[in-house]
Amino acid sequence: MSIKKIVLATKNKGKVKEIQQALKELGIEIVEIEGDFSPEENGATFKENAYIKAYEAAKIENLPALADDSGLEVDALDGRPGIHSSRYANTDKERIQKLVKEITESPKKEKSARFKCEMVLASPSGETLYSSTGTCEGEIIDTPCGTNGFGYDPVFYIKGFNATMAEINLEQKNKISHRGKALKSMIDWLKAQK
Ligand code: ITT
């Protein structure tokens, strides 16, 4: 099966940038979904929510659709915000403030955390063509640093870079991030279909 065009099942501009950058080597046309797109993410896992988004976009556009469901799991918060990372508060700034406050108030003092990403490529008939996953380990710091990326990136510190995820550039983030790792596997699968 040769895939010539894929629609991205996301309205998150940060994700769109990272996914487009990673997929450009493939020579597949990548299009964004137009208009309102907010399917109810009522799955119990990242993977279920990724499938819900991918299938919905694939049906709307009648194209294979790629969805990313991701989030941050913080050990001091027993894995929260997890699949609720987007709904944790209204803006990136408020999400970060709430996260730092909750960790400070937590009896557990672990700073360790990880980003997780589940990616699903679904067909308009609802078939999962391929799915992949990625994890990125780090630590949550109290003071936001950096302006790149999106979401919790300014407080997600990566030891190997001695920097936050918001202080490294797009190419570097794609090499090490949860999304970048899930994309690598997706790219290998797409290449094998040609
Ligand atoms: P779509 O559902 O439209 O894709 P969303 O932002 O609502 O967009 P999710 O439901 O997957 O996406 O929620 C993921 C949230 O987890 C996201 O809004 C960020 O707050 C956080 N997150 C995921 N990946 C991240 C990253 O690479 N850097 C920082 N924060 C990230």
Image: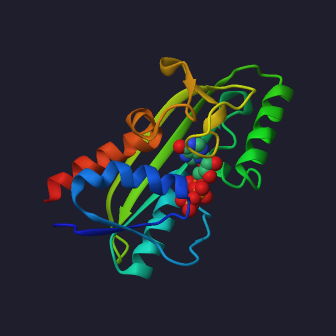
Q: Position of residue 68 (x, y in %)?
A: 47, 55
For image coordinates 79% across by 39% down, the residue present is 97
Q: In front here: 166 or 63?
A: 166
Residue lying at 70% horizontally and 25% vertically, measured from the top left? 141
35 in relation to 74, above or below: below
Is 37 situated above or below 120? below
Picture coordinates of residue 58, whole percent (x, y) = 40, 74
- Quadrant of res 133: top left
Nearest to the observer: residue 42 or residue 109: 109
Does residue 23 appear left or right of residue 162 in this picture? left
Please tell me which residue is depicted at 56% across the width and 31% down the height of the picture: 167
Q: Quarter of the image for the C terminus: give it.
A: bottom left
Q: Which residue is depicted at the point 50% across and 32% down? A: 168
Q: Is residue 72 left or right of residue 137?
A: right
**Is residue 120 something that shows in the picture?**
yes
Q: Tell me which colouring the rendered structure shows.
A: rainbow
Q: How many marks?
A: 0
